Image: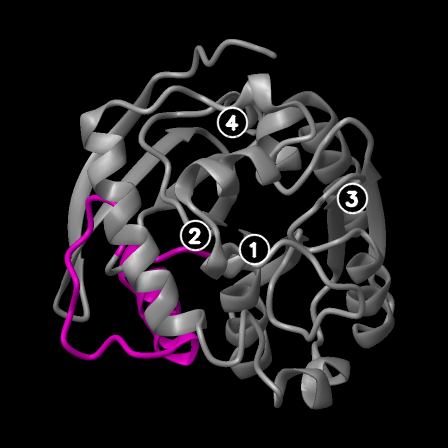
Amino acid sequence: MTTATTSATRTTIEVEGAQVSVLRGGSGPPLLFLHGSDAFGDWQPFMDELAGRFEVIVPDHPGFGRSSTPPWLDTIGDLAHFYRAFIETLGLRDVVLAGHSLGGWIGCELALRDTRDLHALVLVDSAGLPLTVDGVDTFMCSPDEIRAASYADAKRAPVLDEESLANQAKNALMTARVGWRPRFYDPQLAKWLHRLRVPTLVVWGETDAIFPPQQAAVFAAAIGGAQTLMIPGAGHLPHVEQPRAFAAGVLAFIDGVRK
């Protein structure tokens, strides 16, 4: 795995009454990465791989990580509306919107509502649609069991410090609030994904045990013209386990879109 070398900053901004912690690094057009059920504590190697071509912007969702929990937050739709306001507040244009798991679901909901300022969508082992093959039910697992299920190679799982463990509990609570019932999908989303009008790349870890890899074809079939990238040697976190392969696939997709 590569070592992160880009000079990145973490700042806090206020959007829609929420104090939002944001990692930023690199230069170029914006790439907004929406995390899954756990926020990122530090700048990651995959961010570094992308930062040579993009300004990589990685917020902690409201209610997650270092961000505050606003009173209006109840659903994934709330977070989709929030990120429209976030994009406007930062004055972002021509955005590559990438989202992992829960973040991919948010990205789908945002792109269906409003494609202004969006250049492309990258869905990484995304939630949002019913599973066609059962995976590990993370709501029924311990944190250690979830970590083990998330990686093709459990040795790649980072050791968590006290702050990370505290944030993990906060993240789990908020994930349950927005994704518990039904589990990680919106019955309405499948009906309307065919209306999505932004170039889309569906990325999946080849051995994802949480959202099995068959789910990639479900998303690709639902989104007209979507491309698919399967990443070997990766589970539910292909961007973390295989940062170079992930970044190379995303960059090749964006180059194709820009032609």
Q: Which residue is mark 3?
A: 253
Q: Which residues are magenta?
A: 64-93
- Left or right of 115? Residue 22 is left
Residue under the point 68% across and 21% down: 244
N-terminal label among 1 and 4: 4
Q: CA distance from mark 2 to mark 3?
A: 25 Å
Q: Which residue is mark 2?
A: 37
Q: Which residue is mark 4?
A: 51
Residue type marked 1: Ser
Q: Which residue is mark 1?
A: 101
Q: Position of residue 84 (x, y in %)?
A: 39, 70
Residue at disc 1, secondary structure: loop
* Viewer-side residue, 7 vs 94: 7
Q: Is residue 115 visible?
A: no
**Badge 1 density bin: few <14, some 14–19, many ≥20, Cα 10 Å:** many
N-terminal label among 4 and 3: 4
Residue at disc 4, secondary structure: helix
Q: CA distance from mark 1 to mark 3?
A: 19 Å
N-terminal label among 1 and 2: 2
N-terminal label among 1 and 3: 1
* Viewer-side residue, 65 vs 29: 65
Residue 102 higher or lower than 143, as above or below: below
Residue under the point 50% across and 36% down: 147
Q: Nearer the viewer, mark 1 or mark 4?
A: 1
Q: CA distance from mark 1 to mark 4?
A: 21 Å
Tell whether label 3 touches label 4 (CB within 8 Å): no
Q: Coloured how?
A: one colour
Tell whether label 2 touches label 1 (CB within 8 Å): yes
Quarter of the image for residue 227 reads bottom right
Asked if residue 198 is among those painted magenta in the image, a careful observer would answer no
Q: Position of residue 70 (x, y in %)?
A: 15, 69
* Viewer-side residue, 24 vs 61: 61
